[in-house]
Amino acid sequence: MEYSSTEMIACLAARLMAGQSTAFIGTGIPLLGAALAKKLYAPDLIPVFEFGGIGSTLEELPLGVGEARTFRRALAAAGICDVMETAQRGLISIGLLGGAQIDVYGNLNTTVIGSHDRPKVRLPGSGGGNDVGSLCWRTVILMKQDKKRFVKKLDFLTTPGYLRGGRSREKAGLAVGTGPYRVVTDLGLFDFEPASRRMRLIALNPGVGLSEAKAASEFSFLTAKTIIKNEPPTEVELKLLREELDREKIFRKTLAV
């Protein structure tokens, strides 16, 4: 079956969430990935949203993290301070984030393209992104891969990854054991090498070669000794995405992934 890059990213994200208990969900593809995960791979997953929705069933896909459907049949309707404190206490296992730019250490920019005072593009900003990247045990970053997004130097550091690599994250005061876990793109899947904390390619998507992945990044990433191939979206995954989770095609039409 044919599928879009958005669907591929959502499916990979959903598979990564198998066995997770709590997840802080960002806007866009993270919503699709979380909803699909709850249907197929993590039925007991408790989604947490920035504006206080905790444990929504995700039967109807919210359009944003502050939308009413993030509270639909939820376990709790809290507030932004409550959910950030929950993350700070170490009670949220994983966070799903998007980004406009990422560097080799998993630092994210969602603030501006260009100079801060005279930007070419003004982006949404941090919202809860900095908190999610700073406080959740692991973060999964979902984004399209090209040289405008995979950059040597961010125009603005919104959300910390591994900062300058090595132990710089811990030296900055962030908890040991937290940080980016995976980067999911339309070309492949990355982790972070444990010592240097540099991004490392571990899997390629169907039809994608190593040279294509390298050409779509401004920085040089590491490569695993054995690079595997990701499985394409299954019929079951695509049926759920198209006929149940995103029937109106809102995300698949509008997301620039």
Image (tube, grey):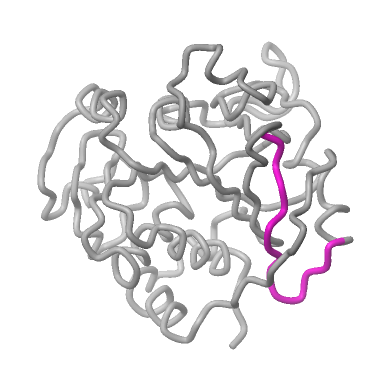
Judged left or right of residue 138, residue 46 is left
Q: Residue at x 79, y 44 (%)?
A: 221
Judged left or right of residue 136, residue 183 is right
Q: Quadrant of residue 35?
A: bottom left
Decide: is 240 above or below 216: below
Q: Position of residue 229 (x, y in %)?
A: 68, 72
Decide: is 151 above or below 186: above
Decide: is 10 above or below 176: below
Q: Quadrant of residue 157?
A: top right
Question: Is 34 included in the stretch rendered in magenta?
Answer: no
Name the one closer to the observer, 112 or 141.
141
Q: Residue at x 65, y 25 (%)?
A: 112
Q: Position of residue 87 (x, y in %)?
A: 30, 30
Q: Position of residue 256 (x, y in %)?
A: 61, 53
- For the N terminus, which image quadrant? bottom right
- For the C terminus, which image quadrant? bottom right
Residues drawn in magenta = 197-210
Judged left or right of residue 256, residue 34 is left
Q: Residue at x 71, y 47 (%)?
A: 200
